């Protein structure tokens, strides 16, 4: 059996996601989900779904959804590719556009799925160290490469690049695809979707999991030039042709139409973030400037992993990464105001006890 496996298997290092506990009394701030429910339009669309419609296969191109998304983002419908979550969109982008044999670049500290797909698809990559302040220096992306992928704002740091900085990367890399994963852009960053009109080497990925409160529905979009989107579509239909389900397509269209609702929730989350950052500051934490719905923080006198474990005993789940450079940081998603008060109070008591 051992030899059978050794000689034939594709060996991979899988992605480890934050825990998904079944106990709903847990305050879950470890995977950056939105604390607010999906919009009234989404709830209505869900109620109006007829199980009879599940009998037939869904529209392979999710055309109704692609049309409303294109209108919302002010791009052509043929520039939009709906996918089953951005993890589906990104995997497709890797196999479609990272084939030069040269290494793909991404930061040493970023979304930990990026190296996983390189491993799975046999794509060489090179990590580019963040600077001393855990920020991306765009000058480090002026070198020969087989493509670039950046999360903006970056995860798990929450630090954002400006469109001007991304423009600099695009200008200096005309021969390769530059992928910008904007999972958290609506919580304080500025999107580069408008740059799609200027740069044919730009691809932008948006998930509906964070800003639009639909992590359980698995909905995302890959956006690029019409030609790039056609290539993505061709690869999608050669590899996994699974379109969005009938339910997901209906709900995705409803979510796009209800932007004012999601905008208001994002504003609330940003206010709660300001409150929580102030609480952390008062307790002596250092924080990176966050343009996302989470904060990345460290304390000079208290060990991050100990705080993580203590919070867990109090049924508060946050994220701790035992990785070089960030192993004394916590990433804490922004929940409701009462969630964040509970976190601040629990950490406050822990620190007070530690000081005596
Ligand atoms: C959450 C997250 C995603 C994944 O989104 P899904 O659409 O739920 O697959 C992608 N990129 C980053 C940086 C994320 O944090």
Image: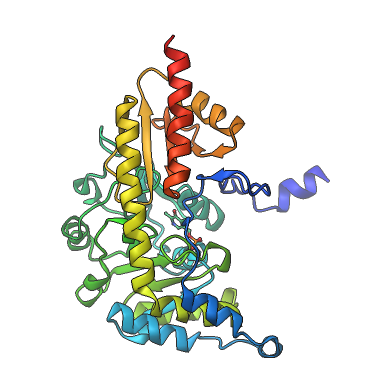
Residue 59 in the image: state x and y as whole percent.
56, 88
Residue 292 in the image: state x and y as whole percent.
34, 51
Residue 129 visible at all: no
Task: Please indicate whether residue 246 sits to the left or right of residue 172 in the image.
Answer: right
Task: Please indicate whether residue 291 sits to the left or right of residue 332 in the image.
Answer: left
Q: Nearer the viewer, residue 72 or 93?
A: 72
Instruction: Give the image quarter of residue 260.
Output: bottom left
Task: Please indicate whether residue 37 sits to the left or right of residue 106 in the image.
Answer: right
Residue sitting at the far top: 356
Q: Nearer the viewer, residue 25 or 178?
A: 25
The residue at the point 21 percent across, 51 percent down is 142
Q: Nearer the viewer, residue 199 or 51?
A: 51
Which colour assignment does the render follow?
rainbow
The residue at the point 48 percent across, 55 percent down is 35
Residue sitting at the far right: 1
In the displayed structure, 16 sits above or below 149; it is above
Residue 21 in the image: state x and y as whole percent.
65, 46
Residue 355 in the image: state x and y as whole percent.
42, 12
The residue at the point 32 percent across, 24 percent down is 284
């Amino acid at each position: 059996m051992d030899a059978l496996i050794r000689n034939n298997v594709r060996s991979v290092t899988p992605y480890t996601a934050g825990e998904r506990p079944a106990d709903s009394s847990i305050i879950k701030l470890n995977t950056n989900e939105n604390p607010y429910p999906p919009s009234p339009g989404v709830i209505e669309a869900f109620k109006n779904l007829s199980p009879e419609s599940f009998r037939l296969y869904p529209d392979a191109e999710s055309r109704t959804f692609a049309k409303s998304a294109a209108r919302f983002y002010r791009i052509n419908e043929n520039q939009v590719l709906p996918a089953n979550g951005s993890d589906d969109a990104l995997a497709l982008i890797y196999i479609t556009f990272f084939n030069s044999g040269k290494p793909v670049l991404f930061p040493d500290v970023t979304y930990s799925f990026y190296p996983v797909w390189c491993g799975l698809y046999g794509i060489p990559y090179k990590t580019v160290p963040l600077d001393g302040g855990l920020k991306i220096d765009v000058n480090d992306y002026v070198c020969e490469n087989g493509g670039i992928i950046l999360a903006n704002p970056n995860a798990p740091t929450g630090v954002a690049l400006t469109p001007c900085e991304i423009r600099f990367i695009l200008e200096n890399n005309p021969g390769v695809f530059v992928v910008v994963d904007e999972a958290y852009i609506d919580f304080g960053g500025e999107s580069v979707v408008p740059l799609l009109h200027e740069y044919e080497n730009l691809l932008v990925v948006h998930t509906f999991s964070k800003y639009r409160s639909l992590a359980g529905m698995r909905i995302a979009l890959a956006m690029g030039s019409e030609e790039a989107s056609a290539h993505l579509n061709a690869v999608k239909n050669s590899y996994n042709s699974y379109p969005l389900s009938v339910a997901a397509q209906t709900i995705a269209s409803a979510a796009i139409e209800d932007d004012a609702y999601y905008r208001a929730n994002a504003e609330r989350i940003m206010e709660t973030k300001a409150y929580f950052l102030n609480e952390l500051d008062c307790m002596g934490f250092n924080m990176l400037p966050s343009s996302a719905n989470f904060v990345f923080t460290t304390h000079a006198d208290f060990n991050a992993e100990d705080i993580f474990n203590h919070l867990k005993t109090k049924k508060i789940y946050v994220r701790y990464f035992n990785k070089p450079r960030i192993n004394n940081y916590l990433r804490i998603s922004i929940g409701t105001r009462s969630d964040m008060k509970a976190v601040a109070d629990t950490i406050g008591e822990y620190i007070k006890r530690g000081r005596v």
